[in-house]
């Protein structure tokens, strides 16, 4: 599949505003991929498709999570988390994307996970820092992203955890695990 066809498929699934966000994530993902040596084409496709399932009905997402052997504890947490694993499933099924690295980058783009691949890190971070984002702290993360990938990822996860805590929301444990893994496996140069 080429880039234009992929964009066309995604455009049908999401709102105009979310499509703009997607184009921003593509730009940031390619920038990060080039900077840190990830596969540029895979980064581009993962970014294009990352929010594919964002507007699927809640019941359809629930049904897919249960039927496709996804972690059932997802259903106990923020439903904003669901579109990521459901997206990975639908992108394979409906768009025919088979590359497991691309699918995993989509699957973990909201929660993160322990021991993330380079591509997973690139997509998680690109989603956080894309040019359309304007929340507090994003400029600091952008600056760090231009210097050290894992440090930027750690900052983005820390901000997300603090953001959720300040709103009295529960936090899906995969994000804590991802954060702990980064802290506990930090390179001395980081
Ligand atoms: N570990 C988590 N537990 C619960 N909610 C989370 C967790 N990580 C991220 N979220 C929330 O999921 C929502 C959607 O995340 P994401 O898909 O990255 O954002 P967006 O829809 O803005 O692109 C955000 O509001 C974020 O706060």
Image (tube, rainbow, N blue to C red):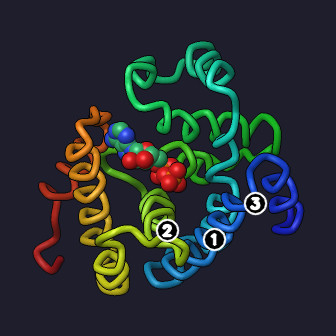
Image depth: mark 2 or mark 3 in front: 3
Q: Quadrant of residue 188?
A: bottom left
Q: Are marks 1 and 2 in contact (CB under 8 Å)?
A: yes
Give the mark nearer the N terminus: 1 vs 2.
1
Q: CA distance from mark 1 to mark 2?
A: 8 Å
The answer to whether one can see residue 156 in this image is yes
Query: Which residue position holds label 1?
Result: 26
* Residue 91 drawn at (x, y percent): 73, 42
Give the mark nearer the N terminus: 2 vs 3.
3
> How many labels, in total?
3
The residue at the far front in this view is: 167
Assign the N terminus to one quadrant of the image.
bottom right
Query: Which residue position holds label 3?
Result: 16
Q: Quadrant of residue 138?
A: bottom left
The answer to whether one can see residue 109 in this image is no
Q: Is residue 61 above or below residue 116?
A: above
Name the element at disc 3.
helix
* Residue 114 drawn at (x, y percent): 30, 45
Within-10-Å neighbours for mark 2: few <14, some 14–19, many 20+:
many
Query: Which residue position holds label 2?
Result: 126
Name the element at disc 1.
helix
Report the side of 140 relative to 59 (left or right). Answer: left
Report the side of 45 relative to 121 (left or right). Answer: right
Q: Is residue 62 above or below residue 109?
A: above
* Residue 28 drawn at (x, y percent): 54, 76
Q: Is residue 79 above or below residue 3?
A: above
Assign the C terminus to one quadrant of the image.
bottom left
> At x 62% / y 62%, what residue is drawn?
47
* Residue 139 drawn at (x, y percent): 34, 80
Within-10-Å neighbours for mark 3: few <14, some 14–19, many 20+:
few
Q: CA distance from mark 2 to mark 3?
A: 19 Å
Image depth: mark 3 or mark 1 in front: 3
């Amino acid at each position: 599949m080429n880039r234009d066809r992929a964009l066309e498929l995604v455009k049908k699934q999401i709102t105009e505003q979310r499509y703009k966000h997607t184009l921003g994530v593509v730009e940031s993902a390619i920038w990060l991929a080039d900077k840190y040596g990830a596969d540029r084409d895979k980064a581009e496709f993962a970014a294009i498709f990352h929010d594919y399932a964002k507007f699927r009905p809640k019941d359809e997402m629930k049904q897919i999570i249960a039927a496709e052997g996804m972690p059932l504890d997802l259903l106990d947490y923020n439903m904003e988390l669901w579109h990521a694993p459901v997206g990975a499933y639908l992108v394979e099924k409906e768009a025919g994307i088979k590359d497991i690295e691309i699918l995993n980058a989509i699957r973990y783009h909201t929660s993160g996970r322990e021991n993330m691949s380079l591509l997973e890190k690139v997509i998680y971070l690109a989603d956080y820092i894309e040019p359309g984002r304007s929340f507090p702290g994003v400029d600091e993360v952008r600056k760090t992203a231009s210097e050290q990938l894992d440090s930027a990822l750690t900052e983005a996860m820390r901000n997300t955890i603090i953001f959720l805590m300040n709103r009295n929301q529960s936090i899906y444990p995969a994000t804590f695990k991802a954060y702990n893994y980064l802290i506990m496996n930090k390179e001395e140069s980081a």
